[in-house]
Image (cartoon, rainbow, N blue to C red):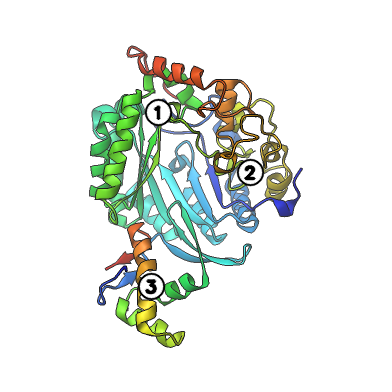
Amino acid sequence: MPTRSEIPAPIAMLAELTYRCPLSCPYCSNPIEMAKKEAELDTEVWTDVFDQAAKLGVLQLHLSGGEPASRRDLVALVAAARKAGLYTNLITSAIGLTQRRLAELDAAGLDHIQLSLQGTDADMADRIGGYKGGFARKMQAANWIVEAGFPLTLNAVVHRQNLHQLPQAIEMAVAMKARRMEVAIVQFHGWAMLNREAMMPTAEQAKEASRIVQEARARLKGTLVIDYVPADYHSDYPKRCMGGWGTTGLNITPDGLALPCHAAQTIPTLEFDNVRDKPLADIWYEGTAFNAYRGEDWMQEPCRSCDRRKLDFGGCRCQAMAIAGDAAATDPVCVKSPVHGKMVKMARAFSQEDTAALVYRKNP
Amino acid sequence: MTTVSAQAVPVIPRGVRLHEDKLRGQWVLLAPERTITLDPIGLAILQEVDGLCSFQTLVERLAAKYDAPVDQISGDVAGFLTGLADRRIVELC
């Protein structure tokens, strides 16, 4: 096990305040089995976790869920996080946010809002979000966010069913005066794993999305910054896993489990500590789940002798688990993986399943 | 060489904050989904950005403070601020 001095302090923490959400997006990154409201950490415990996180070295706090606005104490939590010295980012669908609550969040010191977009019109957004009237409520709240002057990032999750709306989504971000936009092609973890047939983009769509983003980045330089998550089933090399497992960030679930990434619970061999039981620093530096894939000792071939291991750390552990059946294997997205061919075939087959129905996320 | 209009006013917009990262012994700029580690020069520039003074005044102040020729530092300051402005982290109003 590496010593504390060999392990960098985390920079970012994702606090999943609740799994409750008014939407039912079929690509939700939450686990299929979700903790109920009764199991959620209370205001006092979260406040203590924020203090511990700041002392541990965390600079950026992402308040997420579920829908974080479903927490009645959201304003108190933002105030506590700011008091701890953290940069506070609210990741929200905006549904349920009122003008009054936004004013309270503003007064509490909320730094930034990231607003999710399920589609660029009511037909698409309400169908994907599984909530009729949701798009209208979102756009109303979006106007209030802009009027209140919050810095805004628009987060468009795109997939086979809505990729054709990407150019319009980019124009919406400009119209909302968003400084940033995230264009994320659905990552297949959590509920999205149940929807690969219905949502997997075709290889042509994935290529077209990259072209649209590249063109928009050049055209909107200095106006809109676009971060882009490409379709990994159609890529040749994997994404960096969490910027390095246990090196950059951590995730706290609504009931207090500390995870190295939001999908880590899909790796059955890992055991997770709870912030109710142990100091956060002990969990970060000594927890078995955080140490499981730190460094390179766990790597297998072809990663072990590959120069790219310093770039991508072998890719996503959860994807290796899901596709190769071994969380220590090379991410099958990589062309060097022995099961890369299997992944290419899966991607092609899923992307042609035009009759597949959406499986909606259910509330805990 | 990158240039910035002499009259342009550099502003650190809402949602971007200078922060002393005591644990790591450095100053950072906290911005949406970004943490930018500042070297002593970057920090010196941003500490003079008050949202009121023009680029020209900023450069003159820095030149006086660090006893350096205006011409020499003007290009460095312009390059630094333009790089941040392209990423919507600083505004040049």
Same chain for the residues under marks 1 and 3 in the image: no
Amino acid type at image mark 3: Val
Element on which disc 2 rests: loop
Say which chain tag 1 marks. A
| Residue named by callout 3 | B77
- The crowd level at tag 2 (other Cα within 10 Å; few <14, some 14-19, many 20+) is many
Indicate whether A199 appears above or below B60. above
> Would residue A103 appear left or right of A30 to someone viewing this image?
left
Q: Nearer the viewer, residue A15 or A255?
A: A15
Of pointers 1 and 2, the one earlier in the residue sequence? 1
Element on which disc 3 rests: helix
Same chain for the residues under marks 1 and 2 in the image: yes
Same chain for the residues under marks 2 and 3 in the image: no
Disc 2 from disc 3: Cα separation: 36 Å
Residue A288 location (% of width, % of height): 72, 38
- In the figure, residue B70 lies in which quadrant? bottom left
Q: Nearer the viewer, residue B10 or A51?
A: B10
- The crowd level at tag 1 (other Cα within 10 Å; few <14, some 14-19, many 20+) is many
Disc 1 from disc 2: Cα separation: 28 Å
| Residue named by callout 2 | A246
Q: Is the Cβ of the residue at disc 2 closer than 8 Å to that at disc 3? A: no
Q: Nearer the viewer, residue A40 or A270?
A: A270
Say which chain tag 3 marks. B
Say which chain tag 2 marks. A
Residue A282 location (% of width, % of height): 73, 48
> Would residue A239 appear left or right of A304 to someone viewing this image?
left
